[in-house]
Image (cartoon, rainbow, N blue to C red):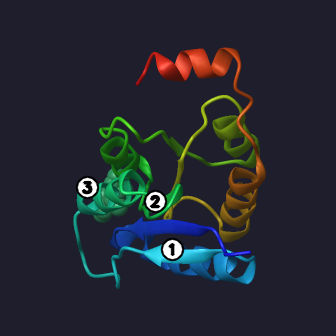
Amino acid sequence: MSKEIIVIASDHGGFELKVLLKSYLTNNGFAVLDLGCDSTESVDYPDFADAVALAIKEGRAKRGILVCGSGIGISIAANRHQHIRAALIHDRLSAELSRQHNDANVIVMGGRLIGVDVAKDCLRAFLSTNFEGGRHQRRIDKMS
Ligand code: RB5
């Protein structure tokens, strides 16, 4: 069976966490499409949110990860795209709910705020939790 591709990107504030999350993904049976950035040199987070949104729109991946310093700017930028439901996550329960109720297709974390173990736990929950549909689908349809 071919591996699911997860698209990932960050700005400089999220670069270090992105590197760790990439290892987590490859160690856990996923393929990674990394759209940058490539160092801690200063860049602009909207460019990386847009790159992930485009990759999902074009079907190069179904699910994505974005990281900036706080997670705030890059989640705002990602959610400007109509097909993106990006959830800024700080804890495991929120990661589960973002899938169960919101069918989030992008998880966002703040590399300067979240601990690495918590980040991996959130990612694990995000990737393994299914959307519940039903009344939640109706609400999502109202945003489409
Ligand atoms: C970059 O310094 C920082 O502003 C950015 O990573 C993010 O936290 C913005 O919301």
Please say if 7 is above or below 37: above
Residue under label 1, please give it.
18
Closest to the observer, 84 or 22 = 84
Please say if 106 is above or below 8: above
> Neighbour class for label 1 at 10 Å: few (<14), some, many (≥20)?
many
Residue under label 3, please give it.
46
Q: Position of residue 128 (x, y in %)?
A: 77, 54
Mark 1 or mark 3, which has the lower sequence index? 1
**Identity of the amino acid at label 2?**
Leu
The quarter of the picture where the C terminus appears is top left
Residue under label 2, please give it.
66
Q: Position of residue 110 (x, y in %)?
A: 50, 58
Q: Position of residue 70 (x, y in %)?
A: 44, 54
Residue at the spot 32% in from the left edge and 40% down from the top edge: 81
CA separation in Å, label 1 and label 3? 16 Å
Mark 2 or mark 3, which has the lower sequence index? 3
**Identity of the amino acid at label 3?**
Pro
Please say if 37 is above or below 110: below
The quarter of the picture where the N terminus appears is bottom right
Helix, strand or loop at label 2? It is: strand
**Identity of the amino acid at label 1?**
Lys
Seen in the image, is 134 located left or right of residue 140?
right
Determine the quadrant in which ligand 1 lies: bottom left
Mark 2 or mark 1, which has the lower sequence index? 1
- Respond yes or no on whether mark 1 lies under 8 Å from ligand 1: no
